[in-house]
Image (cartoon, helix red, strand yellow):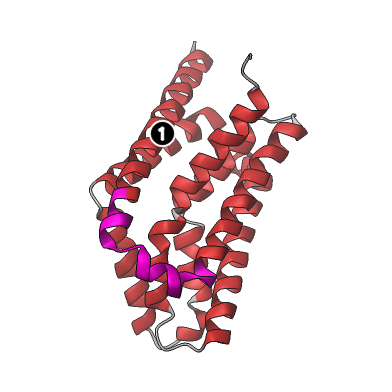
Amino acid sequence: MPPNPLIDLAISSFVTFFVIIDPIGLIAIFNGLAVGLSAPDRKRLAYRGALIGGSVLLLFAVLGERLLGALGIPLPAFRAAGGAMLFLIAVEMMFQNRVQRRAETAQHAVEEPRVDDIAIFPLGIPLIAGPGAITSALLLTSRHKGAPLEQGIVLAAMLIVLAITLVTFLTAARLGRFVGPTLAGVATRLLGILLAAVAVEYMVVGIHQVWDSAQ
């Protein structure tokens, strides 16, 4: 059976967003943010955080290329730079530095006096809609500029990952008993390897396009 480019796009987009957002790695962080909250407040925190993070990603997916144009930043240059940033995130994931950095960000937010806003920071931004996720949303949709079906597939994959993230938040108290530090660490390292491959592709394509435009 010949490969289906639409199915390949759906799978690659889903994997990219899943790796970047990392719902499994966010379970322990969400539980840490929700310490002392009642069940209704935990539910509200989960929904609000997912909604805020998803809205930011959707905004950049739809309007990100126009924003780059307004700033005078060519898309190939952004693609190369974004790939380099994603590669650094992948290295952090493989060496568990990203988990530590996320946990420190969450702990800092809990220690702040305005704990009621943790759904916005750090849960929605940057734990869900961080630099890597924003870059991926922009690059994946801009790659298929002028192709509504392909862009719709990218957005659908992003929304599915956000839905999975919301489910992990809503069930984080139970999942936390099964997904311990060892399992989460193994999953994060494996996802980091996948992200590194995606990042290298972005960098190679971006540099090639910049080189071609300079000729």
Q: Dividing the picture into quarters, in which one does residue 152 lie?
A: top right
Residue 41, compared with residue 51, is above or below; it is: below
Left or right: where 131 falls relative to 150: left
Label 1 environment density (alpha carbons within 10 Å; few <14, some 14–19, many ≥20): many
How many labels were placed on the picture? 1
Q: Residue at x 33, y 42 (%)?
A: 190
Residue 108: x %, y % from top left = 33, 76
Most distant residue in the left direction: 95
Quadrant the N terminus occupies: top right
Name the residue that disc number 1 marks.
Answer: 199
Find out whether residue 181 is within the magenta segment. yes
Secondary element type, mark 1: helix
Residue 198, compared with residue 35, is above or below; it is: above
Whether residue 197 appears in this view of the structure is: yes
Q: Amino acid at mark 1?
A: Ala
Q: Residue at x 34, y 50 (%)?
A: 188
